[in-house]
């Protein structure tokens, strides 16, 4: 078994040719949110992954094995509930309200400009439909928000830049997270 104990977020700093040569490992969200798991890469090698507690593996991240080999992580498609606001049944504010209620229930949630994505739950699906939202079931990779503490940790690891001033501050880089945005709400469901 090949031991993996290092993660490079999105392969930051690695040459494209190295990423192209790397093996891959396809993982669902349930596995990627664990810091210790076993998997098999595209070359058939058994991997024992031992990352620091609290680590979350995202699609596009690169795992580094003890022998120096690189393994690119692919987020596998899985069943999801996709929630969209529809103009004829409500307003975009309904989607914002839904995000608030789901967050209040500590539901893992992926936010997109035109939709919310979460793991299937019939009770939550009924609640969202009562809120004038369209709920469909689809298969897609799931990349939920990491929360306030995870976002701070991801920021520290993903952005290698220095500030020439020494005071505490918050800032938004407005960078793209590489998500594909599909068409708007379809009322034919």
Image: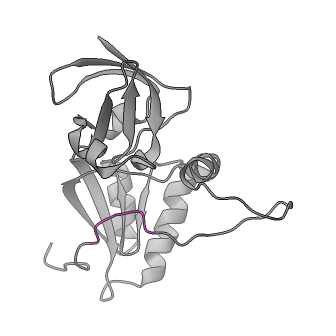
**Residue that extends furthest to the bottom in the rendered view of this protein:** 88
Residue at 55% from the left image edge and 32% from the top image edge: 54
Q: Quick check: is 77 in the magenta stretch?
A: no
User: Is residue 153 rendered to the left or right of residue 37?
Assistant: right
Residue 14 on image: x %, y %: 40, 46
> Residue 11 versus residue 131: which sits nearer the camera?
11
Residue drawn at x 62%, y 69% is 172
**Residue range of the region highlighted in magenta in the rendering:** 176-181
Q: How is the image coloured?
A: one colour
Residue at the outermost top position: 1
Pick the front one: 3 or 57: 3
Q: Quadrant of residue 134?
A: bottom left
Q: Nearer the viewer, residue 132 or 174?
A: 174
Residue 12 drawn above or below residue 171: above
Q: Position of residue 111 (x, y in %)?
A: 43, 63
Quadrant of the frame with the N terminus: top left
Residue drawn at the location 55% of the way across and 26% of the way down: 52
In the image as oriented, which residue stretches furthest toward the right? Answer: 167
């Amino acid at each position: 078994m090949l031991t993996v104990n290092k993660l490079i977020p999105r392969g930051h700093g690695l040459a494209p040719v190295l990423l192209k040569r790397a093996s891959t490992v396809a993982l669902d969200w349930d596995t990627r949110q664990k810091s210790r798991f076993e998997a098999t890469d595209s070359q058939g090698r058994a991997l024992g992954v031992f990352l620091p507690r609290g680590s979350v593996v995202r699609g596009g991240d690169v795992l580094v094995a003890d022998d120096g080999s690189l393994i690119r992580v692919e987020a596998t498609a899985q069943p999801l509930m996709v929630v969209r606001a529809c103009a004829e049944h409500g307003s975009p504010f309904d989607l914002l309200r839904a995000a608030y209620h789901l967050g209040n229930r500590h539901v893992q949630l992926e936010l997109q400009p035109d939709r919310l994505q979460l793991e299937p739950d019939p009770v939550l699906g009924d609640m969202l439909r009562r809120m004038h939202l369209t709920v469909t079931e689809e298969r897609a990779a799931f990349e939920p928000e990491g929360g306030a503490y995870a976002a701070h940790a991801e920021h520290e690891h993903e952005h290698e830049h220095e500030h020439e001033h020494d005071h505490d501050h918050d800032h938004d880089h407005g960078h793209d997270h590489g998500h594909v945005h599909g068409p708007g709400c379809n009322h034919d469901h």
